[in-house]
Image (spheres, coloured by chain):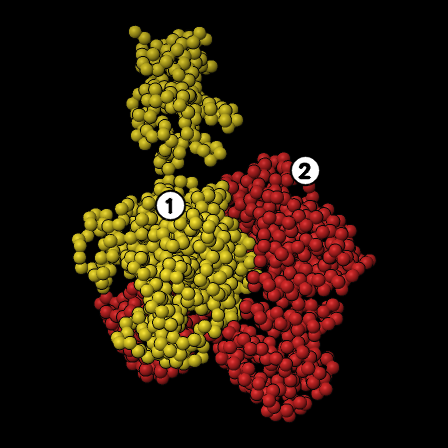
Amino acid sequence: MDPECSRLLPALCAVLVDPRQPVADDTCLEKLLDWFKTVTEAGPSLLLLQENPCLVELLFRVLKAHDPRPRVLSFSLRLAGLFAAQEDCFQYLQGDSSLFVASAAGQLLVHILALAMRGPAEGHPSPQGCDWPACAQKIVCHVEDSLRSTATPQVTQALNVLTTTFGHCHSPWTQGLWVRLSPLVACLLEKDPIPASHSLVDLLLSVARSPVGSSDCGLWETLAQTLSHLSPTQAGPLALGILKLQDCPQALKTQAFGVLLQPLACVLKAAAQAPGPPGFPEGATGDSITVDTFLSSKSACVGLLCQALAHLELLQLLPQRPSPWPQAPLLRAAVAILRFCHGSAAPTSDVGGHLCAVLAGCVRVQRAALDFLGTLSQGTGPQELVTQVFAVLLEYLTSPDSSPMVLKKAFQATLRWLLGSPKAPSCCDLDPHTQLFLGELLPVLRKRLCSPCWEARDSGLEFLTQVTRHWGGQAAFRHALLASEVPELTGQLLRDPESYVRASAVTATGQLSSWGLYATPTGPEHPEVQQESLFTELLHILSTDSEGFPRRAVMHVFTQWLKDGHADVAEDLEQFVARVLQAASQDLDWEVRAQGLELALVFLEQLLGQPGSRCPYAVALPEAAPPATLAQVLQALCRVQLFEFALRALFDCDRPVAQKSCDLLLFLKAKATPCGGPQEAGASPDVVSVEAALQRWQAGEQGQPLGELEPEAVMAVLRSMDLEGLRGMLAKSSDHMEKSPQSLLQDMLATVGVLGENEADCY
Amino acid sequence: MPEIRVTPLGAGQDVGRSCILVSIGGKNVMLDCGMHMGFSDDRRFPDFSYITRNGRLTDFLDCVIISHFHLDHCGALPYFSEMVGYDGPIYMTQPTQAICPILLEDYRKIAVDKKGEANFFTSQMIKDCMKKVVAVHLHQTVQVDDELEIKAYYAGHVLGAAMFQIKVGSESVVYTGDYNMTPDRHLGAAWIDKCRPNLLITESTYATTIRDSKRCRERDFLKKVHETVERGGKVLIPVFALGRAQELCILLETFWERMDLKAPIYFSTGLTEKANHYYKLFIPWTNQKIRKTFVQRNMFEFKHIKAFDRAFADSPGPMVIMPGYCVQGTVGHKILSGQRKLEMEGRQVVITPTLPPPALSHACCDTAAGVMQVEYMSFSAHADARASCSCGQAEPENVLLVHGEAKKMSFLKQKIEQNSVGKPRRGRACEGGFSRACADRARHLAEALSTPPRGQLLYAANGETVTLSTSPSIPVGISLGLLKREMAQGMWAGHAGWGGAAAGQVAPQTAPAPAPAPASQGYSRMPRSPGSCRHPIMKDSNFRLVSSEQALKELGLAEHQLRFTCRVHLHDTRKEQETALRVYSHLKSVLKDHCVQHLPDGSVTVESILIQAAAHSEDPSTKVLLVSWTYQDEELGSYLTSLLKKGLPQAS
């Protein structure tokens, strides 16, 4: 322990045990515990106690006090547990679980049980428990009694304790425990309603995942039984859990998959106009219980559908998902649900009519179904079905009833289906169906970009950016886009009143222009004219926009343009970099300045080569640039005023900016130093002026410009600066002093006596 | 028994990371989603894993409601929606929606830029989170779904702050968020109508405090600022909370104008400047005075207050006024708690007292740069104890205290309970280590509580669930015709609980369709015609009592007749017709209250019961009585059968 802390500790302990002294708030005590934890982890806690007898005194006096203050008592108990944790395993006392007493108590029981069973009872103790330690027997008896209880909270507690046990303890004795307790667990299934069904599901899955699962075949029967006993909504999480298990009988997996598919099977059945193509595998035919749930109430119906969609979405992404995967019926079901919600379905069955009434306009189901439909784009489907998918997506994108959130999801699902759609083999271009769809989609997008709702405009722009990023080179897409008014509208949105939309418009126009798709009145035949105008426009946004988001977006676009070697940027590279850096260096937003340094680094790398390129197949280049080139590079850097920007940024009040600048200058220093070159300049007058400027900036005076710089002078200054030391200092967070244990102890001691009136005066 | 469950995940008995889960009528709502300013690790956000162990949050929660833009009420929102994965709707008022992202961006900046935290939510996440927001207007009833509705009320406190009523069927909860019952210079007082919720969840930050006069505080503040400026000194006012900055700006601006002062006032660029833009926009949310005058002059267009110049900070001799709370771990906290040594931005600053004797909250310090005086002044926008009680205007059944300290809550509870029995005596010694002043404040509070809750006053620690049983009233409709008919038949007389049915209120414990009173002796109370049967019908969420014919008609069902039959053997050598006549005479004499008829075809009827006599196929001296009756006359039918089995009286 730090000597200063050791010195402060006795005074603090004295305050804590003194009932007359007000105690600092809980956060201080929590942080004090955090610190003790790091101290005990760093060295032997026994030594700590010997060197700081005040700690033992504190524990002793608080625990003996007749009426200890609850927060000090709780703190002392946890502190005691912390010290005990080194010898035993009482870590449970630490952490936020103290807020949740039941959970902490459960964890405590599990730890004690595990500890008791660790010694003599290791191996395969008898299930009857006659050879178990008394302490373990007592805990198990308590759990048994709780499982027999008619009070649901008690059953829940017992099930949670067992879940934690099987989750954490994998020794052979857990098998004996399961053999002993499984009949009681099975009894719970006979009750109506099944008590604590959520916790029961957790327990069964926890057992199935533990070594007990691989040895006990009775468990699979219990799982199968539970699946059939639970209501469709309760059975969903269990079914998903079973399908995630690595080793489990195929029959059980089929049953579980059937449970997940039931609601969608019902939907398909309800939506069918006539006997259609084959649906889901056997076992998922839309049973009467699921239908009853659908019919019972709107919230039950919506809840069950959303849950099924979410579970199937998760399952689809797993490597162990059931095979064959019923892609086609799932697609049909998702489309049917979306149509029910949209009111465009014309069902003939009674259940269909009911679903139509219940789901009409239900945003919750719409969101879940669109997410699910998006995930299904990973697979394929018959063309007729894919056409239906695009049709329903278009319905949602067009519909004035779609809420902003639903619209966003519809755009996301559309993007996934578009990017997943196959390309025509001959010309590597989009297939005719996609081209047809694009023809219908772009007018809808155009309309959405004019929406009065900013969320809709923003989602439209995000979609446009993504689709252009992937298809900017596809002739069919380019043709369709240029024929639409979308690029012009995107340009207009650069002046949107909502800053989020302006930022998205900047990103979208940047992307469009990268592919030569940013149309201006001059037309695509004069790309240089339009490029200049977009660059100017974006630069104008960078210099004048009142909000940070659009300015950050501009910097991202410019950096990307520089990285991609955009033809028009490359035309006068230095001019481009100089103008951007000048604007960025004066920005009030730290992220814009940091991004400016990012752009500067890209520029530097383009001139000097990547830092530490480790590709084994790359041609071995000398680490440092040859002197002739270096001199030219340094001249160029001076011309674009990169040095002034970087050196100023070194003392930026925002730490990430200073860090980035430090990294950049270190990179430059490393590239330049081994080559010799112009380092013999010595302490020329230029160096003195640079150093003087640096000192002024360090002192916080930002006003004075540096003026013309000589490369030699800059390099000399760089060599003389302790950039590594600065980097180390910057690595510390701004509140590292306040976060230190000394600061905490001082704060707690300083507040003694002034608490009371001010402490709750928040906000 | 239906119940309302409330679990604070944060701000149960502390201040910070406000987050309260409410389950009402099968719906789950999260109230606020805040951060704790005292932590910079996982503990800064509520522990959401507690909500659902293995399920998805979106499936569990029906909606999230944010009361106002302060970070201890909304700071965890992007984390919750974009990193934990809540995908459902988030409700807040329009000013909150506009200002929330500014504060979240600022919070992100502090966490990422200043403290270097990795894995924090990004700007994109803030935007995506804000896209899930649905803006609500004051007093607008918003249907979250068919059953759950919410309504916002003005809360004062900060621009856009709202109290929310959450209602499912006839059960409701009101959540106050942070509120202020005293109008200040730019906001009005909180107001809620007499909505009589089952539960009022209210903040209790100043549960035991009655603040001194605001006018005095403001006068002191202006005096100190003026004196310092006159001396050529400078005043630095680090305003911790957005909203307070605007209040102080108005205060200073007005004073400057009145006194015709020329010294410049600066406010820091960034947060306050950005927020001011929205304060100018949302004039309807401010108080009456500002609303009235804004056509001539928008109060948030300051003449004397300019953007802050960084160079100003290092000039000598500032006076620092702290108008609010500073959390442990900040320089403000150190200064307020009277520390003499500070390390700021890597520089050791030695502070030595220059004026004797330095009060702890009034430290006069000599920095390397000059003399620094520190004043603590409370300009908080929370309801104090007196005002806390005024929320009794909603007339809640029960009250749950949150956003305050356990000790103060229990003291408050005790005082309120005393108050509801009898006013506590003046100057009575106070328990639990509270000062005399504190006890006096609590007494003020207790006296101010004009309408104490009819039920319980509760508080819960974080993670602790409070459960309230409710008895929702279910309105039942009945046609006047049916009601008159039933009353004429005296069917309601025996059911005191149903007396109010005409008014449409029925206790849920009562069976929806009351079984007819059991026949004990005789049959006079048996329903005599099918018309007197009542059937409950649930249609379009309305519960109605209708006659069985009406029920059948409305449900599109045909009546299904169920008849019981029984054969009774009688020793009687006479002809069948004569036996039937004997049966008729016998029943006529026994069942005086019932309609017994002898039909021309020879059969006998008693109400719906039909009796026919037939000869035994094998034994001519035995007659067989075929008795048949409907399900409705089950008891009469079995009674008749047993009666006939005893035989007929001998003919005289």
Q: Residue at x 60, y 46 (%)?
A: A402
- Estimate how packed mark 2 is, as few (under 14), some (14 to 19) or many (20 or more) residues with alpha carbons within 10 Å: few
Label 1 environment density (alpha carbons within 10 Å; few <14, some 14–19, many ≥20): many
Residue occupied by mark 2: A274
The amino acid sitting under disc 1 is Ile
| Real-space Cα separation, disc 1 to disc 2, in angstroms | 56 Å
Mark number displayed over residue A197: none
A372 relative to A729 in the view: left or right: right
Q: Where is B569 relative to A721, above or below?
A: above
Q: Nearer the viewer, mark 1 or mark 2?
A: 1
Q: Colour of chain A?
A: red
Image side of residue B420 versus residue A709, left or right? left
Residue B245 visible (yes or no): yes
Query: Measured from the top left, where is residue B258 in percent x and y?
Result: 37, 59
| Helix, strand or loop for disc 1 | loop
Q: Residue at x 39, y 80 (%)?
A: B368
